[in-house]
Image (spheres, rainbow, N blue to C red):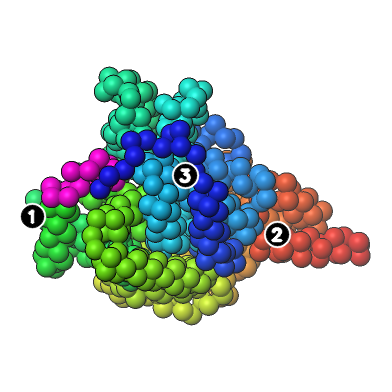
Amino acid sequence: MQFPESSATTASTPKFWLYASLIVLLALLLKIVTLRGEIMMDDRLLITMPDQRGCDTNIAECFRNPLFHLYYRPVLSASFLFGIRLHGTDPFWFHVENLLLHGLGVGVWITLFRRLFCVERTALVAGLLFALHPVQVSVTGFIGGRTDTLALALLGLSLLSLVWTANVRKTYYIVSLLCFALAVFTKEQIALSVLLLPSLLSIVTPHLTKGQRLLYAAPYALILAFYAIIAKTILPSNFFPRLGIAPSLHTEIIGRTLWYYAKNLTGVAPSAFHQSSLGAWSPNQWQTAALGYTVLLGWGCFYLFCARKELRLRFCWWWVSLVLLPCVNLILTPSQFVATYRVPLALPGLAGILALLCTKLETEYSHTVAKMTKATLCGWATLYGLLTLQEAFLWCKEIPVLQTMTRVDPDFLPAHLWLGNAYQQHGQFSRALEEYSGIWSRLRLADISPEQKLIASRERTLRERVWNLCGWSYSAPRFTGWILYQEGRTLLWSGDYTKAIASLKPAFEHDRNEDGIRQSLAYAYIETQQYLLAQNLLFIPSAGKPDALDWQFRGYYFAKQERWEMASDALKRAWEAQPPLDSKARENNRKLLTYVQKRLAER
């Protein structure tokens, strides 16, 4: 397979830019339906919960606190903070931002493919496969998937600027370093890609010596070192838990992880897009692990007999390998469960491999093989497009996504919890309670009181059961307390205040720092006219500065006791407090304030 040495000084034709624009447009059109998407799963944490996002109104806080108490991704947190300042918490605008970032990423990577492969047709084929891969929907239609769309766009800009630095203008080097730093601080998964920078430069700038290429790459390594030092001080000291997992189980976990990512990378197994974990650890699943190691063997053989012979193919092979390496559970981290959100960063390498192989088949083999290659490529792109469209419509609604997730991965209890929460948000309280009841049954805690459930959560047997069905990022007491909280909220909104208090009270005793539990329990006390207990929760000194919901609940507390002036003042403060109320809470606040002001006028 022969390619020109470099395309740095060769201008792309107008036809190339036309086709590239059409690919970007097609990618956006196939996913444009996601603009109607709802807030789902982690979106609520990122948009409405500053403690989970890592920052409230001060952008500096994003760089001082972890995301979800697990990751150090301050640029991602800051992007949501900017979005909230710009347009509030309306999900439509977050979806617009995600779609624009996806379009930017596709355009940047097509341009980079042109510089890397030198042949316009090969670059366009790679760009088409990259843009249409159905796994892109999960990071475009899901607001929290911005982690990958943003990281891909920034990393592509960094590499493209580096190529321009070495061939066109040295001032692009600062842009490249800045974009790389932003990408690393968006998603640490890209860290090992720094090892490929000398290879990239050897492809696009063959006139540079090996020493010059290493000199160009050195500052990127320093950025990684800087990130590692900061992250080590920010992340909890027990980030890598000592789980005491047997080597045989660890070996099986790696094999099952490899098989999961192999299914996702092919893009033709839609069920894999919604598998949230590797499944339960007991009983063993060595057959699945064997499939994963078979894929690994084939991947290694492909390198030995094909990829290592051609520089560009070798670069793409190593891209896929190094980007996915942190995610295959060689080192067990708290976020060990797998997800499609770890796949998109590997797609540029995969798309490049497929495009290069198509070019090889079309140019080096018979006319019949060339025609078959084109037909296969058209069929593959069509299949990707149809799957993308199907996934885009699915990702518009939270409940269908989570129903699919629980059907594909029935033993993953967090997915059942998310589905219960979705039912709760949409007013389907009986279905939500059924999901929570199912979780209790799987944990074998169905027939005991809430207090006994929390006591049982401290026992080793339940801790192992939670690890088995949730993953080791989940603490059994915390997971139990969170189910009690969501169950209590559901009972609260359905009007069963006595049962709600029975669930919320032990949940609050377990975690007094969770504002949501405190506020929900206070509301239940107000509805049962236990005003002193409600007062102790709403005006508790240790709660810190009141947020918007605190002021709203205080207003309701005063209104129930017909203390209209104080109710009006509290409800007005709710409009000004941070974080702002969501759309439903704003409507409730408006109605209550109107009623309070009407009563004041009557006096």
Q: Disc 2 or 1, which lies upstream in sequence?
A: 1
Q: Disc 2 or 3, which lies upstream in sequence?
A: 3
Callout 3 crowding tier (Cα within 10 Å): few <14, some 14–19, many ≥20: many
247 to 430, vertically: above or below: above
Q: Disc 3 or 1, which lies upstream in sequence?
A: 3
> What label sits on residue 111 in the rendered view?
3
Q: Nearer the viewer, residue 345 or 485?
A: 345
Picture residue at 22% right of the left edge, 50% below the top: 329
Q: Left of 216 or right of it: where is 525?
A: right
Picture residue at 43% right of the left edge, 27% below the top: 167
Q: Are the residues at dot 3 and dot 1 in contact (C-beta closer than 8 Å)?
A: no
| Distance from the alpha carbon under mark 2 to that under mark 1 | 53 Å
Callout 2 crowding tier (Cα within 10 Å): few <14, some 14–19, many ≥20: some
Q: Nearer the viewer, residue 243 or 325?
A: 325
Q: Locate residue 422, reporting x and y percent.
A: 49, 69
Residue at the disc numbered 1: 248
- Looking at the rendered structure, the kind of residue marked 2 is Arg
